[in-house]
Image (tube, rainbow, N blue to C red):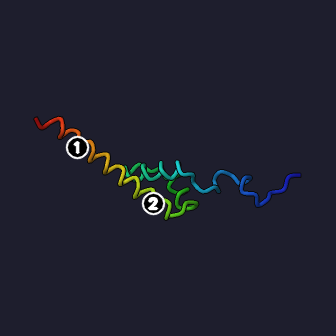
């Protein structure tokens, strides 16, 4: 008979904290307003707020720099 233990590797997937990629997906989905109820519930029950804040700030900075780069590229080719 197999008895349950406190070994973290044996816990169901629902009780594991979200991985980096799951948190990144959640941050991007939340940024565009399309976060699913299932992922939102997982994030609020198992995720650490500080991780989401850090990833959110990094995502916002990268997005802003990418947009700035695109605008600079367009202006470079548009102005004779």
- How far across and down, in percent of the image, does residue 21 sit? 52, 48
Q: Is 48 positioned to the left or the right of 35 in the image? A: right
Report the residue at 76% width, 61% height from top.
6
Residue at point 40% right, 52% down?
59
Category of crowding for the residue at label 2, using alpha-carbon neighbours closer than 10 angstroms: few (below 14), some (14–19), many (at least 20): few
Instruction: Indicate the secondary structure of the residue bearing disc 1.
Output: helix
Mark 1 nearby-residue class (10 Å; few <14, some 14–19, many ≥20): few
At mark 2, the secondary structure is helix
Q: Which sits earlier in the primary sequence, circle 1 or circle 2?
A: 2
Q: Which mark is residue 1?
A: none
Q: Nearer the viewer, residue 38 or 20?
A: 20
Mark drawn on residue 54: 2
In this rendering, the count of numbered labels is 2
Residue 58 location in percent, x, y? Answer: 41, 55
Determine which of the numbered discs, if any, sits on residue 71 in the image: 1
Q: Could you say where residue 79 lies in the image, as x and y percent from the top left?
A: 12, 38
Residue at the spot x=80%, y=57% of the render? 4
In terms of depth relative to the viewer, which is nearer, 36 or 26? 26
Q: Nearer the viewer, residue 40 or 74?
A: 74
When the figure is inspected, residue 77 is found, relative to residue 57, above or below; the finding is above
* Structural distance between the alpha carbons of marks 1 and 2: 26 Å
| CB contact under 8 Å: marks 1 and 2 | no
Left or right for 8, reference 79: right
């Amino acid at each position: 008979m197999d008895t349950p233990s406190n070994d973290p590797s044996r816990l169901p997937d629902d009780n594991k904290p979200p991985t980096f990629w799951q948190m990144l997906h959640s941050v991007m989905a939340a940024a565009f307003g399309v976060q699913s109820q299932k992922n939102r519930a997982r994030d609020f029950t198992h995720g650490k707020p500080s991780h989401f804040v850090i990833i959110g700030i990094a995502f916002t900075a990268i997005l802003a720099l990418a947009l700035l780069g695109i605008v600079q590229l367009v202006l470079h080719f548009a102005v004779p």
